[in-house]
Every structure is written in C-alpha cells, then in structure tokens.
Amino acid sequence: MQATRAERRRSPRPLRIVLIALGALAALAVVALIAVNAYVRIAYSQFYDDAEPVFPIPGLAEGFIPQDLDHVEGRDIWLFSGYVGEGEPSPIYKRMPDGSTQRITVQLPDGSTYTGHGSGITSDAAHLFLTQDEGLLVFDLADVADAPDGGTVRAAAERSLEFSPAFLNIEDDVMYLGNFYRAGNYETPAHHRLRTADGSTNPAVVYGYLASAEAPFGYEEQAALVYSIPERIQGICEVPGGGIALSQSYGLASSHILVYDPTKALTDGSFTADGREVPLYMLDSTNLVSDITAPPMTEGIEWHDDRVYIAEESATTKYLFGNLYGAGQVYALAL
C-alpha cells in the first residue's frame, strides 16, 4: 500500500537518522571523556596535587611517541627522544627557551637513518647520548643544540654495552645505564635477576660509569658500580640528599615514582660488570624512601630546578586514552 504524504512527512529520513545517531555518539563520547577524566583525577589525586603541568610534549600531533627527556644545562633546551612507527625515522624533538619546538632527524655514524626506540637520551657539557639496541649513539652536543628545525644530525660514534639499555641519565659525573624487565616479552639475562634482602626478586640492573677526562667521550668503559632494580623501570635520576628515583610503568597499570636511599642499599656482595667485580647496591623495600603513584605510562624522568620532570607516553595518538586526562604535558613533581 502506498504511504500518504502525511505519513511520509512523519517518517524519519535516513539523513535524519544518521544525524541523530551521530549526536548520540558525540554525547556518549563527552560523557566518557568526563567520566575518564574524573576517574583519573580522583585515582591519582595525590599526584595531581603535588605535580604541576609545565609545558606540552612536542610532536604528539605528528605521531611522536615520547620515551625520555633531557634538559641541556647552560642552554635551557629540552630534548625528547622516542619513535614514530616500526621502521620509520625516530626523531629528536627540541623545545627551545622561547617555547618553540623543532624536529631533528637522527643518523647513525654510517649515514643511515636511526629507527630505534629512542628509549633514553641524556647530555653533558660536550656530548649527547641516545640509546640503541646494541648500546649508545654519541653526538656532539653543539650539533644537536644548533641544528635547525627539519635538520639532520649524525652520530659521531657508537658504543657497545653488555646489555641492551632501556634508559640512561647523567647525574653528578656518573652515567647510569639500565635495562627493562617484564616477564614474557622483555626478558633480561639470568645473572641480572637477583634475590633481594626483603625476599623479592630484582630482575634488572643499572650500571654506573664514572666521568673521566681521559676516557672516550668522557666516561669510563668499565662500570664502577651496579644497582639491582625492580621490574618495569623506565627512567632514573638523582634527587636531593643522594636519593635515587626510578620511574616504573607498563601498559595501563598505575605508574610509580620510587625513591630509594642508596646509602642503605650497599650489599656485602659484588656484581660482575664489564668483566670486573664491582660494588652491588640492592634497591628494594628495605631502603625505599617513598612510592608516588602516578597515571599510566610515565617514562623517562629528569631532575631539574629542584623537581622531577616526567615524560608521559600515553598522550600520543597511538594511545588515545591519554588524551582523556591531559597526559600531553610534561609534569614537574616536587619531592
């Protein structure tokens, strides 16, 4: 039977149905955004009370997945390492003193493009160091600091290590290099997994290399000490009073900023690093000073201006949930 004109007028048109559906979805998205933001702000209220957002992480709109950050002393430049996608060039982003940002392409010593994870970046007065699977890339710091937006910097050298480094930092003339453990997909050598004084197991380590004017690129090739550390550590820095802070995270689980007193962590044993027995420090609950719970996916950390600055991975376009609670900022945490 053919519909009357009045019946056709009362019937919803396809476009109207689509618009109604889109409006409902948009409303649901707004509700979800408000709910997630509220949940995160409540769940991590202490973190947000103590931490301050200081500036946006560069490169997020371009697909950059940040892993670490470094403050270049004397130039007031912030450097960010990370990656974009499998097999794609992994840039360094710079945040200049005026707040502008620059993207730099990185090359290996042979001129090929760096496509690594960019899990760690640090600098001293002369050099910049960037992690790669086999060890470190070494750059002239001036080349990186002075490179224009869109420019390219080429590593001066490579340095091999006994393990694949996941993070690094230079603090008080010591270069710290550590690896990352998560059972099943990020394993570490068996001799890195040590029983601690509190009965738990630390499955990863940090090697400490002392600065030396005679050593290549300013740091000895023989580790002077080793820290035994917990699983899922993403970054390290020193804090006032000689404390050691570790950034712990993986996936959607809560992150933690763990602060230890290394003066209470020295063991009677030793660890074989770079072919020599060196002092072993065991970081566990017996020397844990504080445990600060933070939102998921905290990455590298950097001590500057009396605060710990934190790089957040979750705000990248790869992990949309981070955009729901303002993870696109570098946070500074006073300890």
Image (cartoon, grey):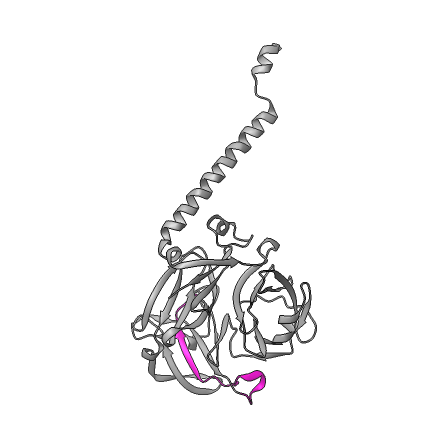
- Quarter containing the N terminus: top right
Residue 1 is at least partly visible in this image: no
Q: Position of residue 92 (x, y in %)?
A: 60, 65
Farthest residue in the front direction?
98
Camera-side residue of 294 and 278: 294
Q: Position of residue 129 (x, y in %)?
A: 57, 75
Camera-side residue of 326 and 118: 326
In the picture shown, does residue 295 fall above or below 22?
A: below
Q: Quadrant of residue 58?
A: bottom right
* Residue drawn at the location 42% of the way across and 80% of the way down: 226
Camera-side residue of 312 and 134: 312
Q: Position of residue 171 (x, y in %)?
A: 47, 77
Residue 13 is at least partly visible in this image: yes
Q: Please tell me whether the stretch drawn in magenta is mainly helix, strand or loop.
A: loop
What residue range appears in magenta? 213-232
In the picture shown, does residue 168 fall above or below 312?
A: below
* Residue drawn at the location 52% of the way across and 52% of the way down: 319
Q: Is residue 215 magenta?
A: yes
* Residue drawn at the location 63% of the way across and 71% of the way down: 144
